[in-house]
Image (tube, rainbow, N blue to C red):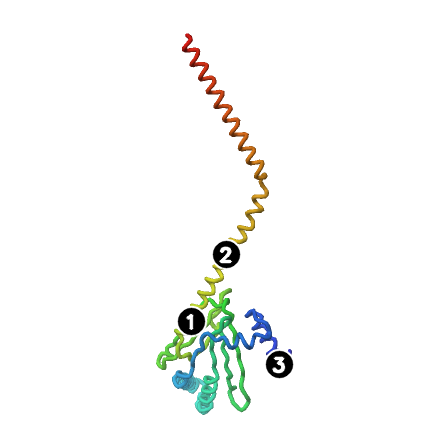
């Protein structure tokens, strides 16, 4: 396995290569061009209350089952601290190339450090942005955003899921509108390139036929032959008319 610094460099290289940027322009262009920055601040208290309720319900069930829930209830103050630090570190924003989600999540016991996660979802790979709200989440007004990817059908657990966004419908609208405009632009560019390709092939197809001068001479010969036929018909008509008059 490589060192952590090497893995970070490789991930950064993959990101700016997929975005079509050079290594010098990645930090200045991709990170700074934020089209929409989602907010989590307004939902912090609701999210923490939701996590507390979820933790207490799980602890009660485990008390009835094996008694482990008592230890979980004793861990609740630390759990609240971990949830707040996790939630305050969340960043979700939308760039011209990708949807970026960053979080610094403390481990179960914060004295052992944090776990840094960065997820980059490239825009052409996004098929839909789904807004979900479970039964328990509805009591606290908490929503979850799930980003579905194009390709082979996968279970929902493999998709990127973010909980606690304050305005999920606005985020979904911005992403889908930008995707629609981007696909329309790609379709128009493809149509223009197809037209240019067809027009570039027309001179070649015309060069396969006979030269223009030969075509004109051939048409003139056909006209001359038809004129001679008409003159012959007129001469026959005049001779037959003269014969009738003489008789």
Q: Quadrant of the N terminus?
A: bottom right
Q: Residue furthest left?
A: 139
Of the two numbered discs 3 and 2 in the rendering, the one whose residue sits closer to the viewer: 2
Q: Which element is circle 1 on? A: helix
Separation of marks 1 and 3 at Cα, in angstroms = 34 Å
- Please give the residue where the numbered disc 3 appears in the rendered image: 5
Q: Secondary structure at mark 3?
A: helix
1 vs 3, front mark: 1
Residue 174 badge: 1
Q: Is residue 59 left or right of residue 215?
A: left
Q: Quadrant of the C terminus?
A: top left
Q: What's the distance in space between the residues labelled 2 and 1, CA to CA?
A: 27 Å
Q: In front: mark 2 or mark 1?
A: 2
Q: Are marks 2 and 1 in contact (CB under 8 Å)?
A: no
Residue marked by disc 2 = 192
Residue depicted at x 51% and y 29% = 223
Q: Quadrant of residue 141?
A: bottom left
Give the percent coordinates (x, y) of residue 142: 39, 79
The answer to whether residue 166 is above or below residue 185 is below
Q: Position of residue 201 (x, y in %)?
A: 56, 49
Image position of 199 with respect to 80: above or below: above
Q: In x, y percent, where is residue 185?
A: 47, 62
Q: Looking at the rendering, which quadrant does residue 242 occupy?
A: top left
Graded by Cα atoms within 10 Å as few (under 14), some (14 to 19) or many (20 or more), the crowding at tag 1 reads: few
User: Spatial distance from mark 3 to mark 2, Cα to Cα?
Assistant: 44 Å
The kind of secondary structure element at disc 2 is helix
* Residue 64 appearing in the image: no
């Amino acid at each position: 396995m490589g060192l952590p610094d090497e893995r970070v460099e490789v991930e950064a290289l993959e990101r700016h290569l997929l975005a079509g940027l050079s290594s010098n322009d990645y930090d200045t262009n991709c990170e700074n061009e934020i089209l929409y920055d989602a907010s989590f601040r307004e939902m912090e208290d609701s999210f923490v209350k939701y996590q507390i309720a979820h933790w207490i319900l799980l602890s009660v069930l485990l008390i009835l089952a094996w008694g482990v829930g008592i230890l979980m209830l004793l861990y609740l103050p630390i759990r609240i601290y971990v949830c707040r630090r996790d939630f305050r570190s969340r960043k979700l924003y939308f760039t011209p190339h990708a949807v970026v989600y960053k979080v610094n999540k403390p481990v179960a016991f914060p004295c052992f450090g944090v776990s840094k996660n960065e997820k980059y979802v490239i825009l052409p790979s996004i098929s839909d942005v789904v807004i979900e709200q479970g039964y328990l989440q509805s009591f606290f007004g908490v929503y979850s955003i799930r980003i579905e990817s194009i390709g082979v059908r996968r279970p929902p657990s493999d998709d990127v899921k973010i909980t606690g966004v304050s305005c999920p419908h606005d985020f979904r609208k911005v992403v889908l509108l930008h995707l629609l405009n981007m696909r329309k632009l790609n379709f128009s560019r493809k149509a223009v390139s197809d037209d240019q390709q067809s027009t570039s092939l027309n001179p070649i197809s015309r060069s396969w036929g006979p030269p223009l001068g030969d075509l004109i001479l051939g048409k003139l010969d056909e006209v001359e032959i038809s004129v001679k036929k008409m003159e012959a018909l007129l001469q026959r008509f005049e001779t037959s008319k003269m014969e009738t008059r003489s008789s």
